[in-house]
Image (tube, grey):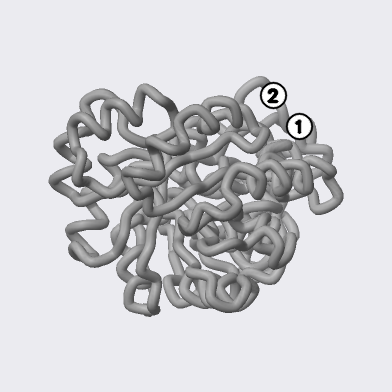
Amino acid sequence: MGTATLHIDLDAIVANWKALAAKSAPGVDTAAVVKADAYGLGAGHVARALYRAGCTQFFVAYPEEAATLRETIGQNPQINVFSGHMAGDTDMISDLNLVPMLNSIEQMTRHFEALPDQPFGVQLDSGMNRLGLEPSEWTAARDIVMAQGPKLLMSHLACADEPDSPSNARQLAQFVEMTEGLGVPRSLSATGGILLGSDYHFDVTRPGIGLYGGLPFGDAQSVVRLSVPVVQTRDVAAGEFVGYGRAFTAETPTRIATIAAGYADGLIRAIGGSAVAFAGEVPCPLAGRVSMDLITVDITHLDDTPTHLDLLCEAQSVDDLAASADTIGYEILTSLGARYTRRYGNA
């Protein structure tokens, strides 16, 4: 029956990176976050396009994610690892020349003993209470750490997507207090932090979701189009139901298209409430529940039977689709399944 096709516009990703770099303060190095396989879009392809465009610093979640990057962009770019130096990571950090963001006294001990000459950064907890050294820990360890020459001091904002949140200013003040005057490059802002303004930019910004067309970067270019083939169409009489649990019942004679994707492909069941598919620019409501491999769509109002329908496109972004499921664009992107045929455009 064919597979759904995920079209990925690398030129749009590069344009989004350049736009966010332009929003960063002068002299700031704009890195790129390509963890989770570049948010599901293919870290190798994305990193190569961004490296060619001038990006020289990347962030991944775990050392294993860096292997693909080294194969595609070589040894020159700096690859930072958010998870730091966990047990069992030593050989990979060394072999791939990675920069772990050490986030605990335990990790510092491990790194300094196992890889004393390997570069590292430090992740500080400025109030999110997720990863990083808390202020009292940093005060105790700072002199020893600084003697080892960290390449970066970083933290992460909890509410950057909410510009009016008082948490942003509190975290900024805490980060400044922990790092001011140390003479080491600093990084606080991902996409949302970049949009908060230059006070949050420091030396390195690290956009993630904004590169891939997601909020809070509302001016981002659209990056993905998900085109799903129509497997079958059928006419349903008034009163007949469609799909599991009789979740959709036709009120009038209805034309139903069944398309070849489902929750096994990352199209989570919750989108069935208010999401639509598109035939060109014409919206077509989903009819009933999303199943593992198939989705049913009401195409009664179309003049012609389509060969495919789009679930992500200019008219329906990852955030639009996420809103129908009461979730966020990050989840939609990173859930996109392995069964899609991926086609990369340009760059």
- Percent of width and height locating residue 146: 40, 44
Left or right: residue 75 compared with residue 23: left
Count of marks, rendered view: 2
At x 19%, y 62%, the residue is 75
The residue identified by callout 2 is 246
In this rendering, is residue 132 above or below 196? above
Point out the image quarter for the C terminus.
Answer: bottom left
Instruction: Please identify the quarter of the rendering in which residue 189 is found.
Output: bottom right
Residue shown at 35% from the left, 44% from the top: 147
The answer to whether residue 257 is left or right of residue 52 is right
Residue at the (21%, 49%) spot, across then down: 67
Amino acid tagged 1:
Thr
- Mark 1 surroundings within 10 Å by alpha-carbon count, few (fewer than 14), some (14 through 19), many (20 or more): some
Please indicate, yes or no, whether residue 242 appears anywhere in the rendered image.
yes
Residue 1 seen anywhere in this rendered image of the structure:
no
The label number, if any, that marks residue 222 in the structure image: none
Can you tell which quarter of the image residue 122 is in?
A: top left
Q: Nearer the viewer, residue 182 or 124?
A: 182
The residues bearing labels 2 and 1 have C-alpha atoms spaced at a distance of 7 Å
Identified by mark 2, the residue type is Arg
Instruction: Report which residue position mark 1 lands on.
Output: 249
Q: Position of residue 120 (x, y in %)?
A: 33, 46
How would you rate the neighbour count of disc 2 (Cα within 10 Å): few for under 14, some for 14-19, many for 20 or more?
A: few
Tag 1, which secondary structure? strand
SS at badge 2: helix
Percent of width and height locating residue 183: 48, 58
Report the side of 271 relative to 21 (left or right): right
Residue at x-position 67% and y-position 33%: 127
- In the picture, measured across the screen, residue 92 lies left or right of residue 157, that is left
Asked whether disc 2 touches disc 1, contact meaning CB atoms under 8 Å apart, the reply is yes
Looking at the image, which is closer to me, 181 or 130?
A: 181
Give residue 174's position: percent from left, percent from top: 69, 41
